[in-house]
Amino acid sequence: MKKPVYIFSDGELKRKDNTLYFEGENGRKFIPVENTSEIMIFGEVSLNKRFIEFISQSEIILHFFNHYGYYIGSFYPREHLNSGYMILKQAENYIDEKKRLYIAQKFVEGAYRNIRQVLKYYQNRGKNLDDTIYAIERLGNLIDGTSDINELMAIEGNIREYYYKSFDEILGNSDFEFDVRSKRPPKNSLNVLISFGNSLMYTTVLSEVYKTHLDPRIGYLHSTNFRRFSLNLDVSEIFKPIVVDRVIFTVVGKNIIKKDDFDGDAEGLLLKDKAKMAFIEEYEDKLKTTIKHRTLGNNVSYRRLIRLELYKLEKHLMEEQEYTPFVAQW
């Protein structure tokens, strides 16, 4: 099974015949082409055209992250499964405002219902979340009645605002208090973890989009414009609560990541490399975790669930089956 390779050191990515390797301060490390789905680059890494040509042939995506660990862009090899028919269908469903709104509403509904599931889980374990659940349920009931994307995004933003404020109750850790949502870069430890986890999810979904006939440049909730990709941002909304946020609750709750795992600079806070690796380990474990799929009847991993979500979207666009979002049952 193919899996991501993460690079934190500075160095060079090179091709030697039909193999790849990374050369850094700790020497040369070979990268098994046949087992690699994508390469996540956090360090200062150089590469050349021969390397790019080879990973294109091997259909390996490169994802780049900045100094703070946040996603900045990808080398997305020429779309090998893209179909003209599917691109036309995606565009048709975007240009038709009613069709676009339906898909966008379903993405927000999936995000809302999975947020609610996370809150219910912790409510059942004694956390005082009654008011938060009541507030987001009232907002969730407004999703289907929205008349445009801006109104829908406002509701989604309000749901997340209530949700993120509940993290203090869930975590009960004064070193990881939410305050307000801050980005680029985040101003406190909890916001650092949220932004880092969300960046990982955006790249995971983008890599799964690459394995379908969908074009990642055409999204529905997030506007299709001059931004490189938007569909991965849409689909990520459904999975962030049940993957990223649960990883955050694990790494903080089990003291895997602590207050001294962060460094401050003039701009804000950043996560030390060792802590990034610890977070990624939990994140990858979560993606590998399997659950019993209600429709298929067999066990599937969270990573596979993301691909299945994209297949459902394809069927909707081809008018084979109306799209409904994945909602966790636990």
Image (tube, rainbow, N blue to C red):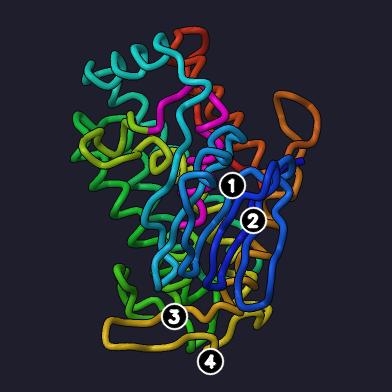
The question of residue 33 being in magenta is answered with: no
**Which label lies toward us, 4 or 2?**
2
Determine whether the residue tagged by mark 3 lies in a helix, strand or loop: helix
What residue is drawn where x is 52% and y is 32%?
Answer: 210
First in residue order: circle 4 vs circle 2: 2
Determine whether the residue tagged by mark 4 lies in a helix, strand or loop: helix
First in residue order: circle 1 vs circle 2: 2
Residue 38: mark in rendering: 1
Quadrant containing the N terminus in the rendered view: top right
The segment highlighted magenta reads 199-216
Measured Cα–Cα span from mark 3 to mark 2 = 26 Å
First in residue order: circle 4 vs circle 1: 1
Report if the CB atoms under discs 1 and 2 are less than 8 Å apart: yes
Measured Cα–Cα span from mark 3 to mark 4 = 10 Å
Q: Which residue is nearer to you in this view: 24 or 166?
A: 24
What residue is drawn where x is 61% and y is 50%?
Answer: 15
Which residue is tagged 2?
5
Q: For the residue marked with disc 1, what is the amino acid?
A: Glu
- Above or below — where is 226 with respect to 181? above
**Which label lies toward us, 3 or 2?**
2
Which residue is tagged 3?
189
Which x, y percent locates residue 23?
62, 66
Which residue is tagged 4?
260
Q: For the residue marked with disc 4, what is the amino acid?
A: Asp
In the image, taking residue 95 as reference, residue 205 lies left or right, namely: right
